[in-house]
Amino acid sequence: MGGTELTAIVVLAAAFILDLLIGDPRWIPHPVIGMGKAIKSTEAWIRRSFRPDNLKKAGILLPVFLVGGSFVITWAVLKLLAWIHPWLGWVVEAVLIATTIAVKGLKDAGLEIYRHLQKGDLPAARTSLSMIVGRETSHLDEPEIVRGTVETVAENIVDAVISPLLYALIGGAPLAMAYRAANTLDSMVGYKNEKYKDLGWASARFDDLANWIPARLTGLLLTLSAWILQLDYRSALRMIQRDAKKHPSPNSGFPESAVAGALGIQLGGTNVYHGVASFRALMGDASRPMEAHDILLTGRLLLTVSVLFVVLAILEIWGAGGALWT
């Protein structure tokens, strides 16, 4: 194995292990906070500079400036650090990639809700769930709390794990950070409400495009992970084929249907957002009632998928003689 392959493998593996060990400590400034401030500032500038009837065209500037800017700034910083000393560049690149993934954060969020349910503390479970979902949680019973948790963890396997790792494999920290900027944009302005239907449309479509391949890859990896964990991998694949495209998102249906099939449960149903009920397409077959243990099983799928992707990425780097970004 040459130096190029070894460096790329160490950087990617170190980023993954760093996230597993410490996640995103609150005392360390996170790049997403800076991205959020930049998005707000750019939005304010666009609204000042363009007439309301031009906001749809101006909305293209958000992904151009924020996604492109995140890539260029990260690339320039890493080049400067590598010029000072190669090891400095490698260490910072691993740290930056680690900030784009959230395996530990997802796993811990699910475990917190599971522990509350095990104690029979529904109010605490609802409060913890409200921290990771947009739906109203104050009225939810235990099966609905489980459904919300499983859906959120499953959906975020794409956004918080596979997508950033895939882009890191292709383009290192600059491309991973660009992806995180796109995802942050979508979460802040990618809504179809009156305020953002024009300004945010380009950001929402860009995020859909960025997650298109990772979502489908995640569905396949979840099927393989279900086989490894001795869950129902055949049903996982069948539900992807049957139900994935029912989801209103072009991407979220793939991980959600795969998890539903693997666990033998049914996801989807009626959610309430700001007092308005919204029906989400059903994923999977309700072969049994949902229970708190399904949160643990989803967490195991999350970890297995994550490790599986990193192993495959390392094999790809080794076989290709280096990552694409090196």
Image: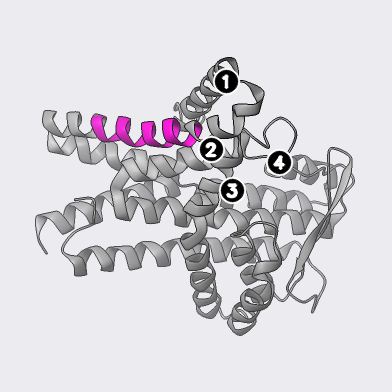
Which residue does the numbered mark 2 point to in the structure image?
184
The residue nearer to you, when weighing 185 against 219, is 185
Disc 1: which residue: 50
Q: CA distance from mark 4 to mark 2?
A: 16 Å
- Give neighbour class at mark 1: few <14, some 14-19, many 20+ (Cα, 10 Å): few
Task: Identify the residue position indicated by label 3 in the image.
Answer: 108
What element does badge 3 sit on? helix
- Of circles 3 and 1, the one toward us is 1
Of callouts 4 and 2, the N-terminal one: 2
Disc 3, disc 1: CB below 8 Å? Answer: no
Residue type at numbered disc 4: Lys
Quick check: 133 above or below 323? above
Decide whether residue 21 is among the magenta residues: no
At x 50%, y 55%, the residue is: 211
Q: Earlier in the sequence, mark 4 or mark 1?
A: 1
Give the residue type that dot 3 points to. Answer: Asp
